[in-house]
Image: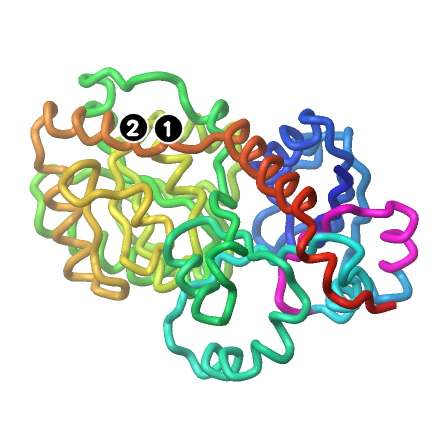
């Protein structure tokens, strides 16, 4: 298959997954920006075996993108955004000529924008796509709500680079001895760094011998942690170094107000970390079972987050080790190899069936 992927950003774990897809005999064209704000992944982490169109400040226009796509001659076009004039033009151009897939990790939260999208979706969204590719249950429910049918859903859209983070079962004494919480993510509003800083400050007041907190990430809200005792700021951390950091921690925190999925939770799970996440994190239904490998707290509730940290740092070593094993079990459900095999089979099956070709071709 020849698969063109129109993206709004490219991370190292996504590139690893696409490498696995190419190794199944597929030709890939990745269209993506050269960098992401506050997440400067090293270029040496990206493979060199796929064709690329890299853009800088703005998505390519139709005049820039369409000739590249015509030369590539895709069987499948996957779009990573609902917007973008060039990307939408590509989906219109390839109606009936290629299988058109929208990647969406959105879930319903009832914003005015989502209500407007729901009303306009049947006219401006659904005609552009033949299938929706989703990472989990919440995003599947969203896709169904806007009009995609069950037969149009492709699941399993996100996977961590599991070989990088999975180093086997954690030793009980080692895990308990780290005595460190870890947060990683861009320091912007929807990741809730200010709420984390406040909850952690309160946590230190309640515990006689508190764990420290590592913060791996960058962004305008880094100032929220200034002057907070026990906090170690790392800035943006490349994936290999983040794996090292996870293996020097005892618990992972992600208290986001809104996190469409959160592949970092998968990374933490396969690294054997107990986790505390907010219910605003899309990955929670798949990677966090309360009482099994951590706890879920209401988004924006600093008191509940503080209580969860107190509880986590107070459990005995046996319970902590059991949570670590639980995270690894839940994280083992998906890997880049499983991701690629599933996507390959799903696309191949739809291409073979060919019912999407009955749609009138638009040139």
Q: Residue at x 16, y 29 (%)?
A: 320
Quarter holding residue 124 = bottom right
Classed neighbour count for the residue bearing mark 2: other residues with Cα under 10 Å, few (<14), some (14–19), many (≥20): some
User: Residue at point 51% right, 54% down?
Assistant: 151
Asked if residue 356 shows in the view, the reply is yes
Q: Nearer the viewer, residue 361 or 199?
A: 361
Q: Nearer the viewer, residue 346 or 266?
A: 346
Query: From where the camera sits, is residue 201 visible?
Result: no
User: Distance from label 2 to label 1 (Cα)?
Assistant: 5 Å
In the rendering, which numbered label is found on residue 332? 1
Residue at x 54%, y 27% (from the top left corner): 337
Callout count: 2
In the image, the segment drawn in magenta is 65-83
Whether residue 107 is in magenta: the answer is no
Q: Is residue 203 left or right of residue 286?
A: left
Do residues under tags 2 and 1 come within 8 Å of each other at their CB atoms?
A: yes
Q: Left or right: where does residue 284 sit relative to residue 186?
A: left
**Residue 343 at what x, y percent from top left?**
58, 39
Above/below status of 56 relative to 326: below
Q: Residue 50, located in which quarter of the rendered image?
A: top right
The secondary structure type at the circle numbered 1 is loop
Label of residue 106 in the image: none
Q: Quadrant of residue 317?
A: top left
Q: Quadrant of the C terminus?
A: bottom right
Residue at the spot x=41%, y=45% of the render?
184
**Magenta region includes residue 78:** yes
- Picture layout, residue 174 above or below residue 196: above
Picture coordinates of residue 103, whole percent (x, y):
58, 55
Q: Which mark is residue 329?
A: 2
């Amino acid at each position: 298959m020849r698969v063109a992927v129109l993206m709004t950003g490219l991370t190292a774990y996504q590139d690893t997954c696409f490498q696995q897809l190419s190794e199944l005999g597929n030709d890939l064209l990745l269209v993506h920006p050269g960098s992401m704000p506050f997440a400067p992944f090293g270029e040496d982490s990206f493979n060199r075996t796929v064709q690329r169109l890299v853009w800088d400040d703005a998505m390519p226009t139709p005049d820039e993108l369409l000739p590249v796509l015509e030369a590539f001659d895709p069987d499948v076009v996957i779009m990573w955004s609902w917007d973008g004039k060039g990307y939408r033009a590509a989906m219109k151009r390839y109606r009936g000529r290629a299988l058109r897939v929208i990647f969406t990790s959105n879930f319903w939260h009832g914003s005015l924008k989502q209500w407007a999208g729901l009303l306009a979706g049947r006219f401006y969204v659904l005609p552009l796509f033949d299938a929706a590719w989703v990472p989990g249950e919440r995003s599947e429910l969203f896709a169904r709500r806007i009009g995609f049918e069950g037969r149009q859903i492709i699941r399993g859209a996100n996977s961590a680079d599991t070989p990088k983070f999975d180093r086997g079962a954690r030793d009980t004494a080692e895990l308990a001895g780290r005595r460190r919480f870890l947060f990683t993510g861009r320091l912007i509003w929807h990741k809730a760094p200010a709420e984390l800083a406040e909850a952690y400050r309160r946590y230190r007041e309640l515990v006689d011998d508190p764990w420290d907190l590592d913060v791996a990430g960058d962004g305008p809200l880094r100032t929220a942690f200034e002057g907070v005792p026990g906090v170690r700021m790392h800035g943006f951390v490349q994936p290999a170094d983040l794996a090292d950091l996870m293996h020097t921690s005892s618990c992972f925190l992600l208290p986001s107000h809104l996190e469409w999925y959160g592949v970092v939770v998968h990374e933490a799970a396969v690294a054997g970390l107990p986790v505390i996440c907010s219910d605003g994190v899309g990955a929670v239904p798949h990677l966090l079972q309360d009482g099994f490998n951590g706890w879920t707290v209401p988004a924006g509730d600093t008191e509940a987050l503080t209580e969860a940290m107190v509880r986590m740092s107070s459990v005995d070593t046996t319970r902590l080790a059991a949570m670590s094993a639980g995270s690894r079990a839940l994280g083992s459900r998906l890997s880049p190899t499983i991701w690629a095999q599933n996507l390959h089979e799903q696309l191949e099956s739809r291409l073979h069936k060919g019912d999407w070709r009955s749609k009138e071709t638009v040139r």
